[in-house]
Amino acid sequence: MSLTWPWALTALLAFPALLGYRWWLRRRRRRDAVRVSSVALIRAALPGRSSWRRRIPLWLLAMALLVLGVGAARPQASVLVPSEASAIVLAMDMSGSMCSDDIAPNRLTVAQDAAQAFVEAQPEGTKIGLVGFAGHASVLVAPTDDKQALIDAIYGIRTSRGTAIGLGILASLDAIAEVNTAVQPTGIELPMPSDPALVALQPDTIVVLTDGANTQGVYPIDAAVQAVARGVRVYTIGFGTTEPAAFVCRSDQIGSFPNGGGRGFDNTGGGFGGGGPGRRFQQLDEESLTAVADLTGGEYFQARDAEALNTVLQDLPRSIVLQRRDSEVTMWFALAGAMLVTTSVGLSLWWRRVSAF
């Protein structure tokens, strides 16, 4: 919790001032009582032992002063609040390793099906963009509410050589800049803010889905710095298993592969190393994906099978729509203080009335 007007905490001095005033009154009564020569009069002048009922209103009033004093400083709490996302950009890995059949029929088909379900699950009017990245990155569909255009583009993805996760993030930022003028394009180099919390959080989100490690282009963490400077969160998803698997893609899923076809790619095909003839094992850079998500205020998810990927993408809107922001909670302190004062005065009057009978 933070305070907008911390100097207003000086109002808390009212509490010790109240106790000091009460102590002074009691001392004065004792001093005045000593001047009377009659012992009976002295005993009559001295205050009797206070019952617990007489102390409760006083302590309730003291608590009220403390609560109201803190409220005067205008406290702010970090809370989850709904936000209308102006754009969600899905950046999908199109590297050759997406042909791996460790998740049947292959990773690309499963990822395409999950992406389609994700798009269809969004409320009408939500703008979604699609970025594809392999050795380079490009905006396949600018943020739009045309779900059919998005689905057609998702199933039109073709694999290629290389994995440029950082370039995928930068291309996604440029796609967001087209629909949100508060987000500057990546052609403008922005330094990492000294305090990311001071950067206005934009209602835009990037979701990166990859099965490998960055092999070329900009480092993902450098691209994440540009996302932080623009107030854009990046959620990352690591997809696939670590088991050696063959590359099996349909002819309509295979794009341009210089020096080779759609099978038997070398290590630059998308984060895969050796694993036997015709088989490769995954080299997923979870450390970088986690760092990107943490730095930008997003979250990293791991999906080892089709069910896990669908679950992640279906639950993701809850994380995207609910954003953590500082919200002033002065009203609650004022309400609590008023209730304490009312209770204190009410009990004092009630018990005094009862004692009179």
Image (cartoon, rainbow, N blue to C red):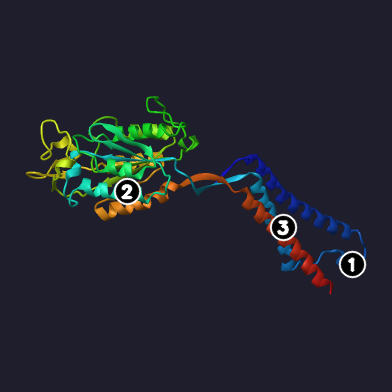
- Secondary structure type for disc 1: helix
For label 3, the residue is 341
Along the viewing direction, whichever of 22 and 90 lies nearer the viewer: 90
Along the viewing direction, whichever of 148 and 326 lies nearer the viewer: 148
The local crowd at label 3, few if under 14, some if 14 to 19, many if 20 or more residues have their Cα within 10 Å, is: some
Image location (x, y in percent) of residue 337: 67, 54
Q: Amino acid at mark 2?
A: Phe
Alpha carbons under labels 3 and 2: distance apart? 49 Å
Q: Amino acid at mark 1?
A: Val
Upstream in the sequence, badge 3 or badge 2? 2
Upstream in the sequence, badge 3 or badge 1? 1
The local crowd at label 1, few if under 14, some if 14 to 19, many if 20 or more residues have their Cα within 10 Å, is: few
Image location (x, y in percent) of residue 116: 30, 48
Alpha carbons under labels 2 and 1: distance apart? 82 Å
Left or right relative to 257: residue 117: right
Q: Amino acid at mark 3?
A: Val
Viewer-nearest of labels 2 and 1?
2
- Residue 39: mark in rendering: 1
Above or below: residue 102 compared with residue 206: below
Q: Give the position of the C terminus as an image quadrant.
A: bottom right
The residue under the point 17% across, 46% down is 100
Q: Residue furthest left?
A: 277
Occupied quadrant, residue 289: top left
The answer to whether any part of residue 282 appears in the image is no
For label 2, the residue is 301
- Secondary structure type for disc 3: helix
Upstream in the sequence, badge 2 or badge 1? 1
Q: How many marks?
A: 3
Image location (x, y in percent) of residue 293: 36, 42
Evaluate if marks 2 and 1 touch, with contact meaning CB atoms under 8 Å apart. no
- Secondary structure type for disc 2: strand
Q: Residue furthest right?
A: 37
